[in-house]
Structures are given as C-alpha cells and as structure tokens.
Amino acid sequence: MAAFSAADVKTLRDRLGAGMLDSKNALVEADGDIEKAIEILRVKGLKGVEKRSGRATTAGLVTAKAGDGVATLIELASETDFVAKNERFLALAERVLDAVAAAGAADVESAKAAPLVPTDTAGGAPATTVQAYIDDEAALLGEKVELRSVEQVRGERFAIYLHKTSKDLPPQVGVVLGYAGNDADTARSVAQHIAVYDPTYTTRADVPAETVEHERQVLTEATRNEGKPEAALPKIVEGKLTGFYKEVVLVDQPYARDSKQATGAVLKDAGLTVSGFARVKVGA
C-alpha cells in the first residue's frame, strides 16, 4: 500500500479543494507522490468537465480592479461555498481578473477568449485563454466553475466596494463607481449605497424613452382602475413616475446614509460627477 499520511491528504485537499476520498484515492494511485496525485486529479477532473456542464453554480465571488481610465468587475461562480472560499479558487479569480482587465474585455464572451500566460503553480496545466484556464482549474477543484459576469466602467477615478454577506465567504456583491472629483470618501459611500439600493441608471436621461413610456402606460391604467377622474390622470401619473425614478435612478434615490437627501444632492455637495457604475451580485 502507498505510504502517505493524513497530513498528505490534507495538503492535497488544501491545494486543490478536492474531496477527502478523491484525494486519498489519488494518493494511493500515485504511490504517495503529491505532485503525481495532483496530475491524476487534474486528468480525472478534465474528463468530468462535460458531465458538470449542466450543474447550477449558485456560489462564487466578485472581484474588481481599476486601471488607467477603466475598471473591471467580474463574477466567478462555483457550485458550493466550500470551493468559493478555497485558496485555489481565490487565486483563480485574481488571475482571471488580471487577464480580463489586461485584454480590455467588456463582456463575458470576449473575456473567456482573452489570452492568459500560463504558470506552473500547484501542478496547474498550461492554458492559453481564460476559458481554458478556468476549465483546467475546475478539473482540479472538482466542480463546475464559470465566468458569469463581466462589467467595465470608465472614469477619471474609481471607488470599488466589495461586500461580504458572510464573514466566512469571499465578497458576494461588487460595485465599481466611476467618477470625477476629489472626495474619495463620499465616492466610496455612494458605491456602498449602490450595493444596497441597486439602481439601474445614473440619471433620468439614461432611462430609455420606451421604458418611461411603458411605465407611464402601466401607471395610467392602474390609476384609472382606481377610479380617479380622467382629467386628473396625467398629473397623478407624473407624480407616480417620480416614485419610479426614485427606485431605479441613482441620483433620485434617497441616500442610504440619510434618506432625507437625494443621492444626487450628496454627489453635488461633494463635487462629484458620476461617469458610470456597475453592480454584480453572485447568483443574481
């Protein structure tokens, strides 16, 4: 029987995030050689990539970085929290983020095709693209892993906020705020506001005309069904549209730290102009 210890099994699990039985069996097959066991798990894992393709990825993390005039935010998804907090998965996310940002990829498909210079760490096999690298690491981790979201924000400066919904897990909600101005503290606070209130647009002008018209029609019909006088409908509907804007437009939303103020007023007082923002939540 191969000579290896419980510490060897733990080492293999810590490096790969593999299950205990899989790690033990790989060490048996590799006669106790950890590096050979890693390769065995990698090969076996790659054979199972297609079998894992239909599985749901409800866990994972978000991470972001800012560059010169552009910031990138990604969501890397896994099947379980066990893998999401594994050191190998965390390292995978950072390498993917670096490659996506370096390539200037603004969407998932172009990000997957982005080039990635291979490194031979922890037995990882060479990869030439982000997707190839993800597949290779997924084989070692033993779960389906996918790059599910990629957002790009342009601006003079950036506030990045990564929120942990559990102290034991990596960040689950990520926000990047692009802005011009000098008040970094307020910019970060607004990024935190976005994490909580999830606006869709920066200003009313950003809301598509067809979206506004659809909302107006819905509100008109609903108000009419309430029995309001026909002549009063336009004024009532416009008032309700204001409520709609407060839900979806950043500058119209009541500020998270002081609901008596609009977020737009807070930005103006701080001398900040928002160039754009992105918010990603794991599994959303």
Image: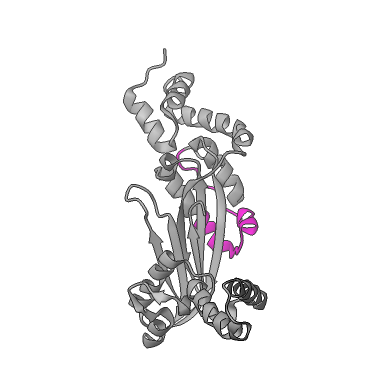
Q: Which residues are magenta?
A: 96-122
Residue 106 inside the magenta-drawn segment: yes
Task: Say if residue 202 shows up in the picture.
Answer: no
Where's the N terminus, which quadrant? top left
Identify the residue at image location x=60%, y=71%.
Answer: 225
Residue 277 inside the magenta-drawn segment: no
Q: Say left or right for 111 vs 14.
A: right
Q: Outermost residue toward the top?
A: 1
Q: Outermost residue toward the right?
A: 210
- From the viewer's perspective, is residue 169 above or below residue 234? above
Task: Say if residue 213 shows up in the picture.
Answer: yes
Q: Nearer the viewer, residue 229 or 158?
A: 229
Colour setting: one colour
How many numbered tags mark residues here? Answer: 0
Q: Say left or right for 172 vs 222.
A: left
Q: Nearer the viewer, residue 100 or 249?
A: 249
Where residue 202 appears, as percent x and y from the top left, is 52, 77
Identify the residue at image location x=65%, y=56%.
Answer: 109
Where residue 58 appears, as percent x and y from the top left, is 50, 45
Q: Nearer the viewer, residue 207 or 65?
A: 207
Q: Nearer the viewer, residue 82 or 20?
A: 82
- From the viewer's perspective, is residue 78 above or below residue 239? above
Where residue 191 appears, as percent x and y from the top left, is 41, 70
Q: Say left or right for 243 vs 215.
A: left
Where residue 219 appears, as percent x and y from the top left, is 59, 74
- From the viewer's perspective, is residue 261 above or below residue 284? below
Identify the residue at image location x=60%, y=84%.
Answer: 234
